[in-house]
């Protein structure tokens, strides 16, 4: 089992790696801190930054899932997993009188995770991808998509993932 300390250290290292790579791609950070401040003719830079943000989100989310699963396996009241992972965590915590303060955010942010993993970071006519996009919009108000329906992941979205996972690790 991962300890709270090793998980927080791992999350910190992931965040530092993300920041280093982000800085290497973009140069010194400047405002506004988004994909649209890059030159439109530098597609390689745009895609590199987009992939950098996806990499952090997926790595941090995986760490959160491992830690949450370890916590749940140690609880006395077992809950059958027949829903999404964040809902199972919330149900398991509730069944054991434990608090999961941002459970709604994790439930909705799981939509972005699913778009990244199952749909290549875009949504289409598939009902699941549409549902995941709706969840993503709830977790990340104002998130946008390209004309090809690729999710445009900004630094603020990445930072929100970092903050909420860190808060879970700290409080759980």
Image (cartoon, rainbow, N blue to C red):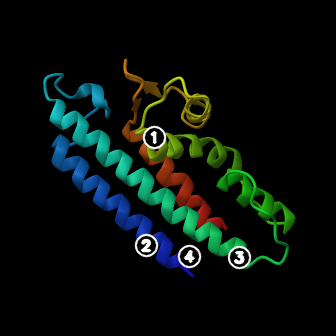
Query: Disc 2 and disc 3: Cα gap in Å?
Result: 22 Å
Q: Are marks 4 and 2 in contact (CB under 8 Å)?
A: no
Residue, disc 3 = 73
Secondary structure at badge 1 equals helix
Q: Residue at x 39, y 36 (%)?
A: 153
Q: Residue at the top extreme?
A: 147
Q: Residue at x 48, y 70 (%)?
A: 8
* Of callouts 3 and 1, the N-terminal one: 3
Coordinates of residue 121 in the picture (x, y in percent)? 42, 37
Q: Are marks 1 and 4 in contact (CB under 8 Å)?
A: no
In the image shown, does 22 or 109 lie closer to the viewer? 109
Secondary structure at badge 4 equals helix
In the image shown, does 105 or 145 lie closer to the viewer? 145
Coordinates of residue 92 in the picture (x, y in percent)? 78, 64
Query: Disc 1 and disc 2: Cα gap in Å?
Result: 21 Å
Secondary structure at badge 2 equals helix
Residue, disc 1 = 157
* Of callouts 1 and 2, the N-terminal one: 2
Q: Residue at the front extreme?
A: 126
Residue, disc 4 = 4
């Amino acid at each position: 089992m991962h300890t709270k300390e090793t998980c927080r250290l791992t999350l910190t290292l992931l965040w530092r790696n993300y920041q280093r790579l982000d800085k290497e791609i973009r140069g010194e950070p400047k405002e506004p801190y988004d994909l649209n401040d890059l030159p439109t003719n530098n597609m390689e830079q745009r895609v590199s930054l987009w992939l950098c943000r996806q990499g952090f989100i997926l790595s941090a989310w995986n760490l959160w899932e491992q830690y949450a699963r370890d916590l749940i396996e140690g609880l006395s009241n077992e809950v059958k997993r027949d829903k999404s992972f964040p809902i199972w965590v919330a149900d398991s915590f509730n069944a054991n009188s434990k608090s999961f303060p941002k459970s709604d955010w994790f439930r909705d942010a799981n939509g972005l995770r699913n778009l990244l993993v199952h749909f290549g970071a875009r949504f289409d006519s598939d009902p699941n991808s549409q549902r995941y996009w709706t969840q993503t919009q709830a977790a990340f108000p104002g998130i946008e998509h390209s004309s090809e329906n690729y999710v445009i992941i900004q630094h603020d979205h990445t930072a929100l993932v970092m903050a909420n996972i860190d808060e879970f690790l700290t409080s759980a």
